[in-house]
Image (tube, rainbow, N blue to C red):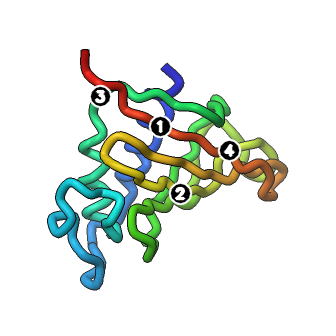
């Protein structure tokens, strides 16, 4: 259930993505079947995240029981979807521990590595890492 909550938070974060897309990034359509090769802009990142339906298992990291809001930030690295802090609820970012920024690295359509930076007392601290794997349908 924590995995579903983490994935839901990440998907919800995409709604603060600006509507515009950068013209210099290749579109997801040019690498169909290989999401790890895409240099994501806001639009293609959102389209990819919409494909993440299903049941996922997470190893590593844990839920802080707060709700930071993350905003997409363009990266030039293929297969990387970057998020930066954009506010949140149920915590004070100046003092409380929370996820402040991070990267999802798309390994393939069923595997995502995450590397996020947790802040505490307003400073970077722990770097929770994890792997999300989509469970196969039975």
Q: Which numbered disc covers residue 128?
A: 4
Question: Is 109 on the left-hand or right-hand side of 105?
Answer: left
Nearer to us: label 1 or label 2: 1
The residue wearing badge 2 is 103
Nearer to us: label 4 or label 1: 1
Q: Residues within 10 Å of mark 1 (few under 14, many from 20)?
A: many
Q: Which numbered disc covers residue 94?
A: none
Q: Earlier in the sequence, mark 3 or mark 4?
A: 3
Q: Could you say whether the residue bearing mark 3 is in a helix, strand or loop? A: loop
The residue wearing badge 3 is 54
Q: Which numbered disc covers residue 132?
A: 1
Disc 3 + disc 2, Cβ < 8 Å? no
Question: Is 47 on the left-hand or right-hand side of 75?
Answer: left
Q: Earlier in the sequence, mark 1 or mark 3?
A: 3
x then y, percent, for residue 32: 17, 59
**Cα distance between the residues tagged 3 and 2:** 21 Å
Q: Earlier in the sequence, mark 1 or mark 2?
A: 2
Q: Could you say whether the residue bearing mark 2 is in a helix, strand or loop? A: strand
Q: Could you say whether the residue bearing mark 1 is in a helix, strand or loop? A: strand
**Cα distance between the residues tagged 4 and 2:** 11 Å
x then y, percent, for residue 114: 54, 48
Q: Earlier in the sequence, mark 4 or mark 2?
A: 2
**Cα distance between the residues tagged 1 and 2:** 13 Å
Most foreground residue, 110 or 100: 110
């Amino acid at each position: 259930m924590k995995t579903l909550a983490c994935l839901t938070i990440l998907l919800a974060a995409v709604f603060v993505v600006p509507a515009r897309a950068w013209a210099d990034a290749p579109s997801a359509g040019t690498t169909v079947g290989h999401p790890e090769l895409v240099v994501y802009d806001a639009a293609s990142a959102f389209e990819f995240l919409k494909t993440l339906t299903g049941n996922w298992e997470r190893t590593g990291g844990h839920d802080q029981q707060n709700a930071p809001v993350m905003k997409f930030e363009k990266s030039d690295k293929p297969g990387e979807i970057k998020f930066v802090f954009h506010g949140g609820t149920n915590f004070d970012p100046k003092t409380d521990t929370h996820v402040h920024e991070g990267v999802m690295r798309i390994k393939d359509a069923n595997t995502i590595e995450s590397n996020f930076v947790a802040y505490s007392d307003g400073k970077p601290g722990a770097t929770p890492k994890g792997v999300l794997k989509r469970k196969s349908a039975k």
